[in-house]
Image (tube, grey):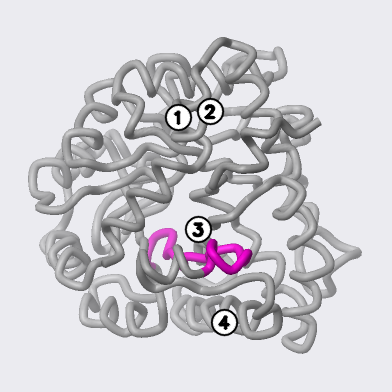
Amino acid sequence: MTTPLHRRAVVADAHNDLLMAVSARPVGRWASFFRERWLPQLVEGGVRLQVLPVFIDDQHRPEGALRQTLRMIECAHVIAEGNADRVRICLSGADIDRALDTGRIALVLALESMPGIDANVELISTVHRLGVRVASIAHWGRTPLADGSGEDATGSGLTSAGVAALREMERLGIVFDISHLGASGVAHVLELAREPVMATHSSARALRDHHRNLTDEQLRGVAATGGVVCVNFLAAFLRDGPEEATLDDLLDHIEHVVGVAGIDHVGLGPDFVREVMDDLTPPCCEGVNARGVDPRVAVPGLEGPSELPLVTDGLLRRGVPEKDVAKIIGGNLHRFLGERLA
């Protein structure tokens, strides 16, 4: 049962790959598929602010990456136009507040890595014109801009093009996302950043030693810029070993980040990948290859946005004050984006 706090709070999700699932459908189904498949879940979960990343799958890299980037951005706009009474793509903090005030879900477009842009930093301005307001510059591996966390052994910082990308994003008002960036790259960004940065979907390395998680030093570094760390729900990033990750494991990570970064610098970045992969696996989508998704990828009971009230309930049961819970489940991200997207 959803608590009164969850119902009245601004619940914000910093990372949901639903655009991958929607854009896999025929163009004429984009708006209706979102309305039928995803909107009810967002509503049930109380989501009022949703960051929508554009992630380019391997099958489109490298030649088709820019084309697919544009296609997914177009998909987001078609979703918004076809569901104008329920959602709105927001370019500014004022847009977000207008969406919330009129009962719509505020959508903020993001790029997860930039395989369609690479070293052509001038194209960052192009995607900004198309509505992108958050972006990262690497995923698991190496890019022309930086190394992802899967390449931590290289000890590499940002390339010269990566530094230029950071500066261009700061000029344009695009929030720099350090999730997926290699450790040396994160240190480089924190050294160079003139504006607050964020992690859209990263958990605590002190609790689970995985390269996708952030160390306490990195957590403090993001907070020192004025940024927000949004905790990832993926089971593999919460617990190691044969036992299933649980809601309590997730709550441990949230409370750890609060303890290190501070209560004003924590949010939620669920990364509901199992839900998306279920949508992409045949027979639902013609021409899309099955992924063989490991069922342990998700915390049981936390497999989609409709289950987000469980996080609120769990934090309240642990004795976290209501005002702090409200900040964690969305208040901080709402404030941060409102300030950064001027």
Q: Which residue is label 4 attached to? A: 77
> Disc number at residue 51?
3
Q: Earlier in the sequence, mark 2 or mark 1?
A: 1
Q: Residue at x 57, y 82 (%)?
A: 77
Q: Which residues are magenta?
A: 99-114
In the visual, does 282 lie left or right of 4? right
The answer to whether 28 is drawn above or below residue 210 in the figure is: below
Q: Which residue is label 2 attached to? A: 237
Q: Which residue is label 1 attached to? A: 203
In the visual, does 208 lie left or right of 169? right
Q: Earlier in the sequence, mark 2 or mark 3?
A: 3
Helix, strand or loop status at disc 1: loop
Location of residue 71 in the rendering, given as x and y in whole percent from the top left corner: 56, 82
Q: Earlier in the sequence, mark 1 or mark 4?
A: 4
- Neighbourhood count class around disc 4 (C-alpha, 10 Å): few under 14, some 14–19, many 20 upward: many
Location of residue 342 in the rendering, given as x and y in whole percent from the top left corner: 26, 67
